[in-house]
Amino acid sequence: MVFVTLFTRLKNVHLLKDIGMVPYHMYREHGFTSVIVTNRNDREYDYLEKEVKGLRLAFIKGKGAAYLIRHAGRIDVLNVYHLNLQSFFLLWLFKLLKKKGAKSYLKLDIDNDGVRRLLMKNPVGWVKRMTIRAADVVSAETGDIYRRLKKIYGKKLIHITNGYYTTNPEPERFFEKKKEVITVGLLGTKVKATEILIEAFVRAAGDRTDWLLRLVGPVTPDFRNPYPEDGRIVFEGEIKDKEKLRELYRRARIFAFPSRHESFGIVMLEAAACGEYIISTEGVPAAKDIIRTTGYGAIVPVDDTDAFAEELKKAMDTDRDWNAAAETIAERTFERFRWEGILDRLAEKLAE
């Protein structure tokens, strides 16, 4: 059985995210021959050597239509991402060319604004709805969006959450949590709302000098830290070393994610797997799923600096046993959001 993910923008980093993890675990746990079809966007795809060994890449030029015309008859499952024109054309082309019994799987990777655009009564909304119509199986990543779309699309739609990459056979343990807040992402973009996090941290910390805010990730050229002299605000830069990033997650008590919108935000899972208390916004639907699972965290309105600062302050002021809480958070995240087992429902649906 051949499982083909057609994603032409693949980079090495994607191999440890859902784009790589879905085909890899369909290979490892469900016996598929898994191939990602992509343009060559990185010089090397190092994760193929160890982390996703057994997953194959096929390099093409163009958007994938020519590949499907040549190879559709060999594909048992075609997997594409997102509600866009490329997915629209690929799914309808595969529908015309596929062999008997073959199926297509559309992973929506959708946020609240994406749902709004899906339901618009205009050509954009029509293309998105027709994209879903062309797929045999469609999945949403977060509970609230799944329940909302399930009312419209019924049995075609399933809930497949995202997971996080780990090689550990057991949850993280033995924490020594420090008075640190951390965030990870492309800092300074409008989506990430970095300016809100910095302002909220300064307000919440007040005169305290024993708390740090660590900001991990590349910074957009036009972003300016409004408090450049505050030594409690540390820009760590981009960290590609997974073990180094893991150690920063293990140290911090709070993971702050003030994004204005996200389809998921896998960094929240990485943080929760290392025992962090999550503070995020209503624009990040996955935050609700993670906090429901762990029992720890808070969600505030988008763009509400006061509310974000208040939740940070509450967390800073609490006298909870942070190390014990971290073990609970890590264990519950491990049980629910490791990639192992997440795709069982997809395999069942494809076999129906």
Image (cartoon, helix red, strand yellow):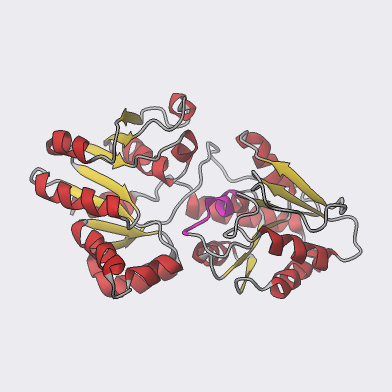
Report how many numbered discs are placed on residues in the image. Answer: 0
**Residue 312 vertical placement versus 324 (above, below):** below
Span shown in magenta? 263-270
Q: Nearer the viewer, residue 131 or 327?
A: 131
Write the residue at 19% across / 36% down.
66
Residue drawn 30% across the image and 35% down it: 37
State whether the magenta stretch is mostly helix, strand or loop.
Answer: helix
The reply to whether the magenta stretch includes residue 267 is: yes
Point 67% across, 58% down: residue: 194
Residue 223's place in the image compared with 63, above or below, is below
**Residue depicted at 33% across the width and 29% down the height:** 56
Can you say whether 278 is above or below 23 in the image? Answer: below
Tell me the quarter of the picture where residue 236 sits: top right
Question: Residue extending furthest left?
Answer: 100
Viewport quadrant of the N terminus: top left
Depicted 208 relative to depicted 78: above or below: below
Q: On the image, which quarter does residue 61 sit in? A: top left
Q: Is residue 71 magenta?
A: no
- Residue 204 in percent (x, y) is at 81, 67
- Image quadrant for the C terminus? bottom left
User: Is any atom of residue 74 visible in this view?
Assistant: no
Q: On the picture, is 163 further left or further right than 72?
A: right
Residue 10 is situated, as x and y percent measured from the top left of the image, at 41, 38
Q: Position of residue 41 (x, y in %)?
A: 43, 33
**Residue 258 position within the rendered picture, expressed as x and y whole percent measured from the top left:** 63, 63
